[in-house]
Image (cartoon, helix red, strand yellow):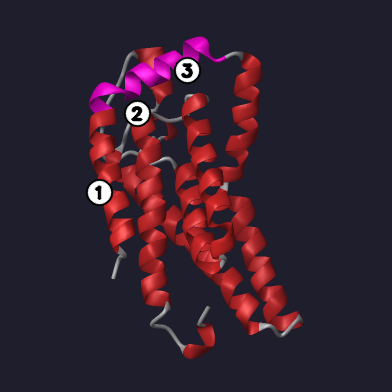
């Protein structure tokens, strides 16, 4: 069962997504494009790299194998396997939604004046919703908050920073980032629910 906290956050974010789409997305994208200095954009470009899923998928997979076969530490191996699954499952879900939604990226607004959705596309220019980097960041924050509660605050700061960076470099609209946050939180919360029902030797 999805926790009340996760459900509340998700519902709140869904409302904010709709409000942002109609009243804030275009204005925010245009403002970031016009007012952020190049050195500020460079900072956000650095931050946004931490939302790239490939590094985490490879790192967590290797760490899980290392602890399982070399150190014979099933507990740590399972935790890294869960982190791998959190990033993978949330990423797959985000990619599916992207194709279905077919949302134009801010770049299309700047160059062609196009805004909105054109469903079922795989072109990068039409895969803005939800933000994949933000999905990864919030999936990690959710997983880390469960596995290592003492680092939960740092995890959320990290996730929010990645989300803001996607808006600042005009790779996504605010509603795309909110959608990524919902996708990351929901997918990992659901994954955790089913993970707990798995074999005893896979417990976290």
Point out residue 140 in the picture as x, y percentages from the top left corner.
52, 56
| Circle 1 or circle 2, nearest the eye | 1
Is residue 139 part of the magenta span, yes or no?
A: no
Q: Farthest right residue?
A: 70
- Using the rendered view, name the quadrant where residue 45 is placed: top right
127 with respect to 71 (left or right): left
Q: Farthest top residue?
A: 34
| Circle 2 or circle 3, nearest the eye | 3
| Circle 3 or circle 1, nearest the eye | 1
Pointers 3 and 1 in contact (C-beta within 8 Å): no
- Report how far apart the C-alphas of labels 1 and 2 lie in the structure: 24 Å
Query: Can you identify the residue that label 2 sits on?
Result: 104
Query: Can you identify the residue that label 3 sits on?
Result: 32
Badge 1 marks a residue whose secondary structure is helix
81 with respect to 14 (left or right): right
- Magenta-drawn segment: 21-36
Q: Residue at position x 39%, y 20% from top?
A: 28
How many residues crowd mark 2 within 10 Å: few (<14), some (14–19), many (20+)? many
Point out residue 103 in the picture as x, y percentages from the top left corner.
32, 33
């Amino acid at each position: 069962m999805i926790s009340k906290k996760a459900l509340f956050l998700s519902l709140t974010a869904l409302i904010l997504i709709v409000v942002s789409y109609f009243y804030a997305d275009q204005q925010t994208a245009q403002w970031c494009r016009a007012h952020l200095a190049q050195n500020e954009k460079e900072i956000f470009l650095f931050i946004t790299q931490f939302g790239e899923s490939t590094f985490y998928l490879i790192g967590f997979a290797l760490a899980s194998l290392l602890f399982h076969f070399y150190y014979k530490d099933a507990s740590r191996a399972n935790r890294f396997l869960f982190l791998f699954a959190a990033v993978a499952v949330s990423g797959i879900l985000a990619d599916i939604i992207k194709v279905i939604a077919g949302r134009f990226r801010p770049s299309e607004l700047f160059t062609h004046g196009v805004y909105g959705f054109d469903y079922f596309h795989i072109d990068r220019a039409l895969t803005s919703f939800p933000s994949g980097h933000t999905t990864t960041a919030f999936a990690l924050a959710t997983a880390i908050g469960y596995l290592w509660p003492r680092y939960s605050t740092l995890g959320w700061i990290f996730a929010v920073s990645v989300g803001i960076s996607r808006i600042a470099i005009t790779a996504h609209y605010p509603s795309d980032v909110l959608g990524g946050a919902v996708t990351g939180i929901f997918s990992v919360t659901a994954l955790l629910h089913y993970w707990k029902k798995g074999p005893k030797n896979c417990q976290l």
